[in-house]
Image: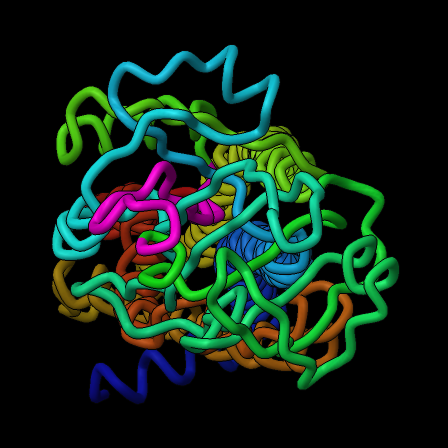
Amino acid sequence: MRPFNLVLREIAHRKLNFLLGAICVAFTVTLTFGAMALLRAHDLKSNSILEKHDLRTVEILAKMEAETARNMDGLEDAIRKSMKGLGFNIFIYPEGQDMAEVYSQGFASKTMPEEYVTTLANSEIVTVNHLLPRLTRKIKWPEQDRTVVLIGVRGEVPLAHKDPKKPLIEPVPAGKIVVGYELHKSLGLKTGDSIPIFGKKFSVLKGHSERGTVDDITIWMNLAECQELLDQKGRINAILALECNCASIDRLGEIRAEISKILPGTKIIEKGSRALARAEARVKAKSTADREKATIQASRLDQRTNESARLEELQYSRERMASMLIPLVAVLCIAVVGVLSFTNVRDRQSEIGIFRAMGVTAGRILQVFLARAFLSGFLGSILGLGLLYFLGDTYKETHLFGYALEQLVDSQLLLQSLIFVPVLACLAAWLPSLQAARRDPAEILRYE
């Protein structure tokens, strides 16, 4: 009889034993690869949770940055408008000027060359802009027999390295004057009126509204004409500027340091204003926003660390359980296959003895039992993989978090199990089959 037919007859004669072995193998295959799929699914889910956490952190920080940028832009624009509305806030005075005198009378008695403003404009200065040279004196207006403040200005001098900016004040044309509220009100001056100053006729360009300061008794005129009237040709006693709205702790210190390099010996003061307070508020707001961002970032990082540690602990627990359960099941499976083989061999002693007495070699007997074990393992592998795919599809959403089985277990490994598992079944059946094949047929038939 051919060996293959002998194997089939052997299987047909002991169907239950064969099927029990196949079922045991199938259970082992399903459990082993199922545990691997579950562990991989939980691992991917953990990574997905951490990735979503990271993305959420990025979204929160991006939203905060955008909101901070909007707030800073709004505050920046408000400060810019406010500072423009309140005028110049940096005053540069001549070298050796007594600042107590400036504070008491409102202007410097000493003068400096008008070229200073050109020198400043042609430099690489970045802390100020809107440069305006000015000559100011308190004079006795002989034609009206009253004391006024005469101010000579020209157009703002643009910085050579920056784009021209819209001037804070318009220059006074030659032959024109701008008068303070108290003067044009008391003298009844109107736009276009002609009025003499030190014998020279000037036309009223406009009158200022009431300000409640010394500006109400000022007369503004062209700088060159003012220098001529005061006999101060080419001289000024102040350069006005507007500080750049920079987020700096020591703004004035930086301004003084930069201007002192360009115009050594000059005195620089900063005029306090609501605009400066808002500039400081801007710095504080930016600092607060940065601190809040850092706090949220640290908090989110701490949450991520805790979440990562929790997920790693769960994953470790699952892996530890699987590392104990899978080998235990595999050993039990081998033991069951071995026991079934031993039972089958024991129950077939008489048949084995007859075959041996008829001349069937021990090797052929061993081949039959090992082939039977191989086919049992192969059938069990197919059943186990089929059950694995069925369960994987059934519990894909509930237990595998939507991942397909192919994403969780290497397909090549599944195919290799069709060879590896039957070989393992042969190893489990090796000893009882070898023992049965090597027994003397005379000894077997003596008792059977």
Q: Residue at x 14, y 68 (%)?
A: 359
Percent coordinates x, y for residue 49 in the rendering:
62, 54
User: Residue 362, can we see it?
Assistant: yes
Query: Which residue range is magenta in the image?
Result: 228-247
Question: Residue 210: x, y in percent?
Answer: 85, 56
Q: Residue at x 55, y 34 (%)?
A: 312
**Residue 66 percent location from the top left of the image:** 61, 62
* Residue under the point 77% across and 68% down: 398
Q: Is residue 130 above or below residue 440?
A: below
Magenta run includes residue 355: no
Residue 309 visible at all:
no
- Residue 183 to residue 436: above or below: below
Instruction: Identify the image's colour scheme: rainbow, by chain, secondary structure or one colour.
Output: rainbow
Who's the residue at 49% across and 48% down the image? 245
Query: Image quarter for residue 279?
Result: top right
Q: Is residue 101 above or below residue 174?
A: above
Along the line of sight, which residue is nearer the eye, 30 or 225? 225
What is the quadrant of the N terminus in the image?
bottom left
Q: Nearer the viewer, residue 254 or 180?
A: 180
Displayed quadrant of residue 195: bottom right
Comparing 48 with 165, the one in front is: 165
Query: On the picture, is 133 further left or further right than 359?
Result: right
235 magenta-colored: yes
| Res 113 → quadrant | top left
